[in-house]
Amino acid sequence: MSDAARVREDMDGNVLVLTIDYPQRKNAIAPAVRAALEDALERAHADKAVRAIVITGAAGTFCAGGDISSMDVGTALDGRERMRRTHRLVRLMARGAKPIVAAVEGWAAGAGMAVACACDTIVAAEDARFVAGFGKIGLMADMGLPYFLPRRVSVGRARRILFYHEVTGAIEGEQIGLVDYLAPPGKALEVALDKARTLAASAAGPIELTKKILSEGLDEALADEATFQGLLFTTSDFQEGRSAFLEKRTPKFGG
């Protein structure tokens, strides 16, 4: 992985802090970033010295979404395989042994919102913002967001967020269940570490088994997501949406 895209790993006592650090793309989940997160989480779940995990982003942004420049998919099967690889990260977060706290500053957009919602707890700075936005490039939400979001905010509210690309501020997010704890601007990591230390001091077994119960049905949802998104990758609307994003213009979808 190049110096431009990395995930920093730091221990704070028995809490592992993973920092997405990809400044050129505002911490987008590029393939290299995703692979680094997966590797770090796999090691952490197997390491008895790690009792809880915090995921955050560098330079005041949690994650601006997927790296759209890397979304060059040829066939539906290629798209399905891409999603299968992506879902390894989702499963490590939702079904892994260790509790995970998101520390959100700035934007959590697209895949960044999905990563936050896959965490067990979301701490957000009061000026943080969340948006799905997948439809703007002709795709449906993925990385488990169609599974996690309605479990946080209700199905009706999830439809609003996913269909209308509504931006949700952290204060409103806390009111509707998207955000668990608020922090002053610039203090999300500090508050997230405090919550993670509480989890780290708790009995590990009940947390691990509760995570497994709360994620029942995830595998079926991800299987559908892989099939549906794999098909959408092949559509002319996705090609138009991707081109419009890269060219910084408004897409013209043909349906």
Image (cartoon, helix red, strand yellow):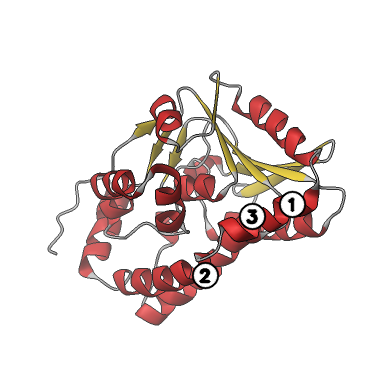
The residue at 45%/36% (across/down) is 177
Q: Residue furthest left?
A: 254
Label 1–label 2 contact, CB within 8 A: no
Of the numbered discs 3 and 2, the one sitting upstream in the chain is: 3
Of the numbered discs 1 and 2, the one sitting upstream in the chain is: 1
Q: Which residue lies furthest to the right in this view?
A: 49
Q: Residues within 10 Å of mark 3 (few under 14, many from 20)?
A: some
Let me know if residue 31 appears in the view. Answer: yes
Tell me the SS state at disc 2: helix
Question: The residue under label 1 is which amino acid type?
Answer: Pro
The residue at 28%/49% (across/down) is 159
Residue to which mark 2 is pinned: 219
Residue to which mark 1 is pinned: 206
Q: Where is residue 97 in the image (x, y as percent from the top left)?
A: 72, 56
Q: Which of 100 and 152 is in front in this view?
A: 152
Tell me the SS state at disc 3: helix
Q: Where is residue 25 in the image (x, y as percent from the top left)?
A: 48, 44
